Image: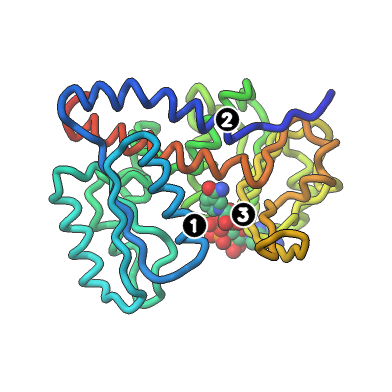
Amino acid sequence: MATQIIDGKQIAKDVRKKLKPRIAALLDKNIVPGLAVVLVGEDPASQTYVRSKGKACERLKLHSVTIRKDASISQEELIAIVEGLNADDKIHGILVQSPVPSHIDELAVTLTISPEKDVDGFHPYNVGMMLLGRGALLPCTPNGILKLLEESNIDPTGKEVVIVGRSNIVGKPIAALLMQKAKIGNATVTVAHSRSKDLAEITKRADILIAAIGLPQFIKADMLKDDVVIIDVGVNRIDDDSTEKGYKLVGDVDFDGCFEKASHITPVPGGVGPMTISMLMENTVTAAEKINGLS
Ligand code: NDP
């Protein structure tokens, strides 16, 4: 069977297209969904993500605000900014770009975001609702992965899903979502991490392998069984003198080496990344609808 590349760019575009009538319906009521992104410090990757989020809002004609603050900002000042956004009627989604400087308690900031405006889906209220299978604002990257599977007609029911990585933003939530009794769920989920023994023995069980590790090209073909579905969440920069920037982006999976083994595979870039942004747009629209009692 020829390997299919899962085109995250196209699926993300389709998600945005489906949002347009919902945005128009809100506009009819004089509501423009608004997203505020708070960026602290100069982290280059964060700057790129924040720019992409702003552009996505622009394309959908959403109201978008980016608040840039120096890395020296105090926790109290940052919390005051979030409180201001909670009270701002024009803002329906609030996102504080991670990572924040080490002197700031990220959880304290997340706890300040009003759960109904928590478009990242990181507030413990939304995490709890997700675990109960009742989440309205699901975390963007895991939700994007569900969408990629759905649109590629991959039904996880009864499948062995192995997730490598147990972060709060990717590994844990995608595990919780794929084990739910839900249309895109019902999987038998294993979560591996840096303390797992015999990782290759675990990953070889996977019908669907999700890599969220942060190590370039870490998953090799000999760690996988034939016809595996590969979802590569990783985004890593590696040196490449042949490019203008001197680097290129690669995933956590050795794409070329694993390609033949896979039935489906997401590329990096152009796989999970674009989905994350589109699901953020969807959450912003959902939040605007809910806050205004329209869904
Ligand atoms: P974290 O660093 O928070 O988590 C990495 C996980 O990988 C940890 O659970 C860690 O284990 C595990 N790990 C590290 N080394 C190994 C190893 N040798 N064997 C097995 N497991 C290992 O990363 P994130 O989840 O935040 O991100 C993962 C990747 O996904 C990154 O490349 C990031 O840039 C990318 N990303 C992409 C997004 C997108 O939209 N495309 C969105 C979010 C992230 P332990 O817990 O034991 O330390």
* Callout 3 touching callout 2 (CB < 8 Å): no
Q: Which residue is mark 3?
A: 235
Quick one: label 1 or label 3, which is nearer the N terminus?
Answer: 1
**Three-letter residue code for mark 3:** Val
Quick one: label 3 or label 2, which is nearer the N terminus?
Answer: 2
Q: Which of 123/246 is in front?
A: 246
Q: Which residue is mark 2?
A: 10
Q: Is residue 100 left or right of residue 110?
A: right
Q: Residue at x 36, y 41 (%)?
A: 57
Q: In whole angstroms, how far apart are the C-alphas of marks 3 and 2? A: 19 Å
Q: Is residue 122 above or below residue 208?
A: below
Q: Which of 124/259 is in front?
A: 259
Q: Is residue 166 left or right of residue 287?
A: right
**Three-letter residue code for mark 1:** Thr
Q: Position of residue 56 (x, y in %)?
A: 42, 41
Q: Position of residue 206 (x, y in %)?
A: 72, 38
Q: Mark number for residue 48?
A: 1
Disc 2 is placed on an element classified as: helix
Q: In whole angstroms, how far apart are the C-alphas of marks 1 and 3? A: 12 Å
Q: Position of residue 171 (x, y in %)?
A: 55, 49
**Three-letter residue code for mark 2:** Gln
Q: Is mark 3 within 8 Å of ligand 1?
A: yes
Q: Which of 190/216 is in front?
A: 216
Q: Is residue 290 left or right of residue 236?
A: left
